[in-house]
Image: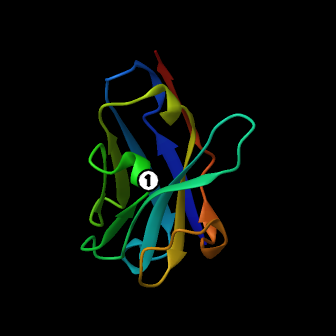
Amino acid sequence: QVQLVESGGGLVQAGGSLRLSCAASGRTFSSFAMGWFRQAPGKEREFVAAINWNGRDTDYIDSVKGRFTISRANAKITVALQMNSLKPEDTGAYYCAAVYGTGVPRELQEYDYWGQGTQVTVSS
């Protein structure tokens, strides 16, 4: 079993930055691919970014490329999402997810473990 706890959300003005963190516990963290998803009010949860088990491969949704960076520190059992140049359309609840194995999954159904989410609100 893997437990995920997100932190770092908040209210920020457009153009600002936030850094989200996801702390993992349970099984061997380094064996898991990790992802970030977000869900805006009234919308479906969508893929944002993912990183493979050793941190050498990443993937992003087009709308955040060049602004967001996903990283992981296996020794600290954390994965982070650095978000720069934030826009109002980035507003939503952000969720950390994990799945055992290789690759950088983009689909919700590929992930087995989820955190409770942290709210990000970007004001215009």
Q: Which residue is mark 1?
A: 23
In the rendered image, residue 62, in percent from the top left (x then y), is placed at 41, 54
Q: Amino acid at mark 1?
A: Ala
In the rendered image, residue 78, in percent from the top left (x then y), is placed at 36, 56
Please identify the residue farthest to the bottom as the structure is shown.
101
The quarter of the displayed image where residue 55 is located:
bottom left
In the rendered image, residue 115, in percent from the top left (x then y), is placed at 59, 53
Please identify the residue farthest to the front as the structure is shown.
62
Residue that appears at 49% across and 26% down? 88
Nearer to us in this view, 28 or 36: 36
In the rendered image, residue 12, in percent from the top left (x then y), is placed at 41, 20
Nearer to us in this view, 43 or 53: 43
How many badges with numbers are in the image?
Answer: 1
Tell me if residue 122 comes above or below residue 61 in the rendering: above
Tell me if residue 60 comes above or below residue 30 in the rendering: above
Q: How is the image coloured?
A: rainbow
Tell me if residue 86 comes above or below residue 99 in the rendering: above
Please identify the residue farthest to the right as the structure is shown.
42
Residue that appears at 49% across and 35% down? 90
Residue that appears at 44% across and 75% down? 32
> Where, quadrant-wise, is the N terminus in this rendering?
bottom right
The quarter of the displayed image where residue 110 is located:
bottom right
Nearer to us in this view, 89 or 27: 89
Query: Secondary structure under badge 1?
Result: strand
Mark 1 is surrounded, within 10 Å at the Cα level, by few (under 14), some (14 to 19) or many (20 or more) other residues, namely: some
Nearer to us in this view, 20 or 62: 62
Residue that appears at 53% across and 74% down? 99
